[in-house]
Image (cartoon, helix red, strand yellow):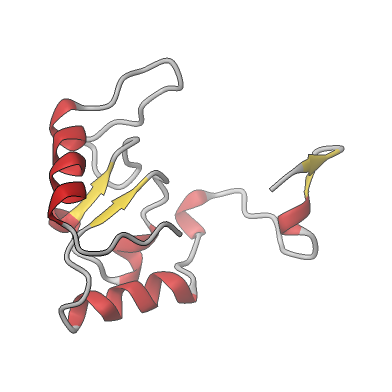
Amino acid sequence: ATKAKNISVSNVGKPILKDWKKAKPTLSHHVLVSLYKVGFLKYWIQQNHDSLPQKAGYPQYLLNEIHGSLHDPSNPIVPYEGSLRNDLFHSMEKWKIKSDLCLAL
């Protein structure tokens, strides 16, 4: 999304959420969890650290929060000038090779 005068074009008409803990999963999060439950989604790599997959019901152990997590204290947020965790990066590389299909949402 682009920003003009500090107003996100993608958020026009939507309420401003000031507390990330109050954020709710979208329909997309719930659909992905449903795909997991029927065996079509094996692993989720996410750049956001908003905890929405977990709130939708996705298990933490199958989630790679590559940029860190607000939900998992053992995975601190990676600052812009920081480096990704080696174990999470290698896991992402493993799944890149292992996967039949990758969805970028």
Name the residue at the top extreme.
81
x and y percent of residue 25 in the render?
A: 45, 68
Query: Measuring 61% from the left and 48% from the top, which residue is drawn there?
Result: 18
Q: Is residue 23 above or below residue 83?
A: below
Q: Is residue 37 above or below residue 42?
A: below
Residue 87 picture quarter: top left
Is 87 on the left-hand or right-hand side of 73? left
Closer-to-camera residue (38/18): 38
Residue 47 picture quarter: top left
Q: Is residue 68 above or below residue 48?
A: above
Res. 99 visible in picture:
yes
Query: Measuring 22% from the left and 70% from the top, which residue is drawn there?
Result: 41
x and y percent of residue 5 in the render?
A: 87, 37
x and y percent of residue 104 in the render?
A: 41, 57
Number of numbered callouts drawn: 0
Query: Measuring 48% from the left and 66% from the top, which residue is drawn there?
Result: 24
